[in-house]
Amino acid sequence: MDLKPHVNKLMKREIYTYLTISLVVILAFLIIQALVVTLDDEVTNNEYLKFVWTWVIGALLLMWGLGPWLSYLWIVNLEYSIEDERLVIQKGILTKKSISIPYSAVTDFTLSRSLYERWIGIGTLLVQTAGQGAQTGVHEGKLEGLTDFDALYTTLRGKIKAFRGMKQEEKTETPTGNASDSEVLQSILEEVKRIGRKLE
């Protein structure tokens, strides 16, 4: 099953994120300006506007000029493939990167929904593998921009259970070798007893 993120909704989330960053930066520099101008008599509002705000506005314009386009290119190149034994994530702008996560390595899936994602109606599934997880803040894979995230979450968890059930059946079907192990141990014990008798 191949999936793609919902481009429009994911782009809305990115635009809201850029708006939030812009507002936080503007508020932070307004507070800094008020403190600097109030505490330092040598700095005037005109000097602060000329030197600081020029750089701040330039950085914000650069972010708004490049950020949304790069985000759009990133989103349209995202693709998820749910196979029988693995989950494949394809991403990249100039070069394509394919991340293949076998179900045998997956420990859990985490459904994450930020404030903007809940508002827009999308969700993100985080794939946790052995040695990585929510406590470290690192995830092997991320499926973003999903509209039908609850059904996909259920499907993936079912695939992992089915895959683990098949592996368990394979283990029970293969001979364990307990009988041969006990025979080997018995012969070792008899040999040790025989050596002990010779030493006496």
Image (cartoon, rainbow, N blue to C red):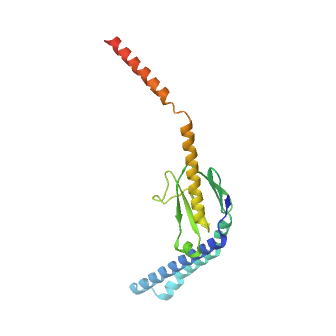
Kindly identify the residue that appears in the image at 53 percent across and 66 percent down: 112
Q: Residue 152 occupies which quadrant of the picture?
A: bottom right
Q: Is residue 59 visible?
A: no
Vertical arrangement, residue 54 with respect to residue 140, above or below:
below
Kindly identify the residue that appears in the image at 42 percent across and 22 percent down: 186
Instruction: Please tell me how many numbered marks the rendered image carries.
Output: 0
As drawn, the residue found furthest toward the left would be: 200
Kindly identify the residue that appears in the image at 58 percent across and 57 percent down: 156
Vertical arrangement, residue 118 with respect to residue 40, above or below:
above
Describe residue 113's horizontal placement relative to residue 79 as left or right: left
Describe residue 38's horizontal placement relative to residue 85 as left or right: left
The percent position of residue 83, horizontal first and vertical second, equals: 65, 53
Viewer-proximal residue among 59 and 112: 112
Kindly identify the residue that appears in the image at 50 percent across and 85 percent down: 47
Quarter of the image with the C terminus in it: top left
The percent position of residue 141, horizontal first and vertical second, equals: 57, 58
Viewer-proximal residue among 99 and 147: 147
Q: Residue 191 occupies which quadrant of the picture?
A: top left
Q: Is residue 196 visible?
A: yes
Vertical arrangement, residue 94 with respect to residue 118, above or below:
above
